[in-house]
Image: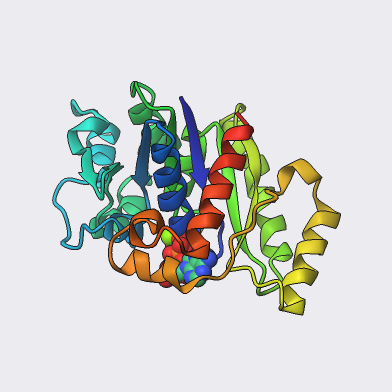
Amino acid sequence: MKVISIANFKGGVGKTTTAINLAAGLKKKGKKVLLVDVDPQSNLTQSLGITEDIKDSVYTVLRKEAFGEQTKITDVLMTASDLDLIPSSLDLAGAELELASVYGREQILSQLIKPLKGYDFIFIDCPPSMSMLTINALVSSDYVMIPLQAEFLPLKGLRSFLKHFELVKKLNKRIELLGFVLTKYDKRKKMNRQIKSELEEEFSEDLIFKTYIRSNISLANAQEKGMDIYSYDKNANGAKDYNDLTKEFLSKF
Ligand SMILES: Nc1ncnc2c1ncn2[C@@H]1O[C@H](COP(=O)(O)OP(=O)(O)OP(=O)(O)O)[C@@H](O)[C@H]1O
Ligand SMILES: [Mg+2]
């Protein structure tokens, strides 16, 4: 069982889209996958078709675990669009403050994930900030995967992420950087090509996924419809790219 956080401080770079379509791609290949939404925006949960705010979410079990109540993460497990999901809810936004004084607050999610069995991969979709929730995700993880949009100069933000990542390593020595994935990529755009080569200059080759995800409106439409890209349009560029990413991802294990 490998636990992978999908994180980047920057918003809208394709974290949630990558979590869904990588999970769906792995499931197609017969892998057992669990998605965990720790973003109070609940985009992952909503993108799997759960549009009403739910009562029992990751927030419920985080609170119980933090305050020493009997609980397990599977108490809030659900199936959405055919994928196993630990959903988020809007009240998760309050967790940061509520749990601020809890001893060992960085380890709460990790304690909940540890007893899980039977999954090949667990993906944790993080909010776009280094919040207590992101730290909890990283402390629970074996790897972090970083989607990057080649549209704006992302390297400054990346360096800041990597600085924080070094601090997280003090709390979780086993975590490794699995790699960067370029998303919303358009090779006709000079800026996109430029950022790709800057990334290649700065980081070692094995830290950059060879597969990049092209800009593809079907990915956004699928998300809006509460579907993964393969169910929405298996011939879309997005389906091909995420299928390639799934294969490359698997080759790393
Ligand atoms: N390759 C792509 N091509 C076109 N649109 C995309 C692509 N990837 C993601 N999108 C769309 O861009 C928007 C942001 O993507 P997504 O929600 O995955 O980003 P995020 O990093 O999770 O954002 P946040 O930081 O807010 O959680 C969504 O509307 C999504 O459907
Ligand atoms: Mg997101």
As rendered, which of 186 and 150 lies closer to the eye? 186
Can you say whether 91 is above or below 36 in the image?
below
Asked where in the image residue 154 lies, by quadrant, the reply is: bottom right
As rendered, which of 243 and 47 lies closer to the eye? 243
Asked where in the image residue 178 lies, by quadrant, the reply is: top right
Of the 4 image quadrants, the one containing the C terminus is: top right
Tell me, yes or no, if residue 60 can be seen here: no
On screen, residue 50 versus residue 219, left or right, reads left
Residue 221 spot, x, y in % from top left: 37, 71
Residue furthest to the right in view is 201
Residue 6 spot, x, y in % from top left: 51, 48
Residue 227 spot, x, y in % from top left: 31, 58
On screen, residue 235 versus residue 143, left or right, reads left
Q: Residue at x 24, y 57 (%)?
A: 91
Asked where in the image residue 83 lies, by quadrant, the reply is: top left
Ligand 2 positioned in quadrant: bottom left
Q: Please, which colouring scheme is shown?
A: rainbow
Residue 200 spot, x, y in % from top left: 81, 55
Tell me, yes or no, if residue 208 can be seen here: yes
Can you say whether 5 is above or below 171 in the image?
below
Can you say whether 240 is above or below 184 in the image?
above
As rendered, which of 84 and 94 lies closer to the eye? 84
On screen, residue 160 versus residue 224, left or right, reads right
Count of numbered circles on the image: 0
On screen, residue 109 versus residue 18, left or right, reads left
